[in-house]
Image: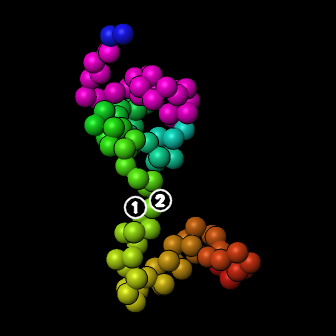
Amino acid sequence: MTKAVLPEVLTIEEVAEYLRLPQEAVIRQALSGNIPGRKIEDNWRFLKVAIDEWLSSPHNRAILIQQAGVFADDDSLADLRSSIYAARGRAEFEGDDNI
């Protein structure tokens, strides 16, 4: 079987074929920020190296949780978090109606 050589910058179609996913799934995941890519006007572009790193990296949520520990002693974090939830019109905790 001959292995196709992919370009450094991939289109939706190429990423979908590379990941063996429907194009709609790639678009949905790119829109939600789960797959690294950039939308340029009406077109999505993906760096193949970024896709490869994304595939081989630990779960992104675990990385964010590890990085969040850096802010554990930051006194302004609680106020910042509260203001973000208030700006989004969401309760910070379930059952909390004080937004």
Label 2 near label 1: C-beta < 8 Å? yes
Is 55 or 40 nearer to us in this picture?
Answer: 55
Q: Residue furthest top?
A: 1
Residue at 35%, 34% (x, y): give it.
Answer: 46
Q: Is residue 39 left or right of residue 88?
A: left
- Which residue position holds label 2? 61
Residue at 27%, 18% (x, y): give it.
Answer: 5
Q: Is residue 41 visible?
A: no
**Residue stretch in magenta:** 3-27
Residue at 54%, 80% (x, y): give it.
Answer: 82
Neighbours of disc 1 within 10 Å: few (<14), some (14-19), many (20+): few
- Which residue position holds label 1? 63
- Element type where label 1 sits in the image: helix
Q: How many marks?
A: 2
Q: What kind of residue is marked 1?
A: Ile
Query: Residue 27: x, y in percent?
Result: 51, 34
Query: Residue 51: x, y in percent?
Result: 36, 38
For residue 98, the mark is none
Q: What kind of residue is marked 2?
A: Arg
